[in-house]
Image (cartoon, rainbow, N blue to C red):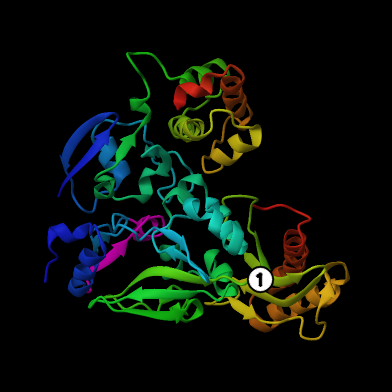
Amino acid sequence: MPLDIMNLMPKDKKELIECLSQMNEDTRFVAGGTDVLPSLEGGLKKFTYIDITHVSDMDAIKVTEDKVIVGATATFSDIARNQFIRTYAQALSMAASQIGSVQIRNRATIGGNVANASPAADSLPALALLNSEVEILGPNGQSKMISVLDVIEDVGVSALRPYEVIWAFHIPIRPHVRSAFVKIGSRKRVTISRLNLAISAKFSGEGLSDVNVCLGTLGPRPLLIANIDRDFKDISTKDFPIDFFLNLLTNVVDLAIPNRPSRAYKRTAVRGLGIDVLDVLFGRRCML
Amino acid sequence: MEIKMVLNGRVEFFDVDLSIRLIDFLRSRGLTSVKEGCGEGECGACTVLLDGKAVTACTLFAFQAHGHEITTLEGLQKDGELDVIQRAFIENDAVQCGFCTPGMIMAVKALLKENPNPTAEDIYIAIEGNLCRCTGYLPIVKAVLQIVREGAGKECL
């Protein structure tokens, strides 16, 4: 059934739900377009695209008592400069500010970055580290919540059905927890990650606990390693066991990509990233 | 599909093919300052302003400009006078082959609209998505710093 032309640019959630009920194999959603258009390579007539950037409230960034809610069409420029995210989800703010160029960040959306399911996506390790849940909207207007890691089925394949769309990301606020994100690519800026790394820890005075790390680009999904501090509870930042931490990162790379040619590079590079991310987490280097 | 946009300051209605990119649409209207380099948002040669913000016209469908204000380099001149950024680029030899120049100027325009007093680091970040293979970037940054020094960035607000 051909789509009603009016539905090519839904203006609110109600019109978006109408679109969802009309989706078929010839229709796709487009938001910022920064992944969609380059992927078409001249095949621009393949699908009918529905522009969801006009949907009101879908780009909103809000804070409630216990979580930050980031609308799916919030751009990375919006996210990088948002004060709630800088306060409660620093790793996501840092990831957003390092994605692409100004031009890309002005259009690329967080929902698009996740739905595109690239192993090199920079928002994914940050979102996974922060235990984010994804609110997915279906054709009858019903929403379901799933873990951000469960959105990714394989390289470039998301768990979204054609009649579903990401509406928002729900990021829990964890008191006294700080986080950080770093990446490395083939050049300093405007680069696709060859490796990215996010870390979070709970701070109480000089001590820290609940240290979680998340590594991207080593498989279809980011690898989340929770509570790496289970053997050194409540240590101070100055006694942080750096060698243990860096060896852990190298081991993760070795286990994740034992036969990939890039293993030799990544098992070394991840140690540099490990030092960088601790510098940022402990406030020795400012990324916000 | 009929769309409405403000193109270089004028409200206009266009009938656009749903599959055409914004870059192709603008060039078909004679706005040939919008250059195609990479076609995937990497080089910035097609940078235009969408509601005052720098975007790459090769990564948008033309119909996505509906309801927005699009400004290309052609929209910068007022009453036949070059924009302050265009003048500074000329005065500082910030142009060699010229292919990147329209996109570079639009990226700088977006920067100065938001921040009329940027630092050199702010300028480098603003043009990080614009590749230039001739100038080495130094005369471009010098041109923008001249605008800042002369207090002329306010003209872009």
Q: Residue B134 at what x, y percent from top left?
A: 57, 31
Q: Is residue A191 above or below residue B145?
A: below
Secondary element type, mark 1: loop
The answer to which of A235 and A77 lies nearer the viewer is A235
Res. A152 visible in picture? no
Image-based side of A212 in relation to A165, left or right = right
Q: Amino acid at mark 1?
A: Ser
The answer to which of A188 and A139 lies nearer the viewer is A139
Is-magenta flag for residue B47?
no
Q: Residue B110 at what x, y percent from top left?
A: 46, 35
Image-based side of A210 in relation to B80, left or right = right
Is-magenta flag for residue A37?
yes
In percent of the image, x 37 and y 70: which residue is there? A166
Image-based side of B112 in relation to A200, left or right = left
Label 1 marks which chain's residue?
Answer: A
Quarter of the figure with the N terminus of chain A: bottom left
The residue at the far bottom in this view is: A231
Q: How many marks?
A: 1
Q: Is residue B98 above or below residue A196?
A: above
The residue range painted magenta reads A24-41
Q: Residue A88 at what x, y percent from top left?
A: 59, 63
Q: Is residue A127 above or below residue B157?
A: below
In percent of the image, x 75 and y 77: which residue is there? A209
The residue at the far front in this view is: A65
Q: Quadrant of residue A128?
A: bottom right
The answer to which of A136 and A216 lies nearer the viewer is A136
The residue at which mark 1 appears reads as A262
